[in-house]
Amino acid sequence: MHFSVEYLTQKDVYKLLTATVTPRPIAWVTSNNANGGVNAAPFSFFNVMGSEPPLVVFSIAKSSVRTKKRYNRKYFA
């Protein structure tokens, strides 16, 4: 999303950015695959990384084998 903050005070930029990450919301992050299809995944691990320019970033990590084994157990189904 593009948002112009050039007319906002530094305090208002700070309020806007912190409101995007608290309380911990879910961000639907989308991408396009090689065939042009859209992929969407929920992310809850993101934060404000700066106010000039204003940046909100998210972090992704590959799941470990141990985590995958836990989720494959019946009590997670």
Image (cartoon, rainbow, N blue to C red):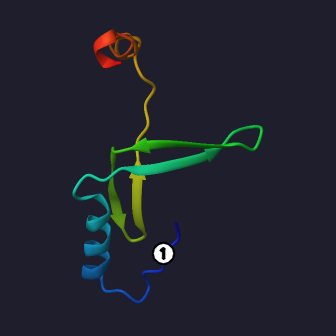
State how many labels appear: 1
The structure residue drawn at horizontal position 43% and vertical position 31%, both measured from the top left corner, is 61
- Residue designated by label 1: 3
* Residue 59 in the image: above or below residue 47: above
Q: Quadrant of residue 50?
A: bottom left
The structure residue drawn at horizontal position 31% and vertical position 73%, both measured from the top left corner, is 16
Q: Residue 8's x, y, as percent?
A: 36, 86
**On the rendered structure, is 63 left or right of 1?**
left
| Label 1 environment density (alpha carbons within 10 Å; few <14, some 14–19, many ≥20) | few
The structure residue drawn at horizontal position 23% and vertical position 59%, both measured from the top left corner, is 22
Q: Residue 6's x, y, as percent?
A: 44, 85
The structure residue drawn at horizontal position 39% and vertical position 12%, both measured from the top left corner, is 72
Q: Residue 65's x, y, as percent?
A: 41, 12
Q: Secondary structure under badge 1?
A: loop
Q: Amino acid at mark 1?
A: Phe
Most foreground residue, 62 or 24: 24
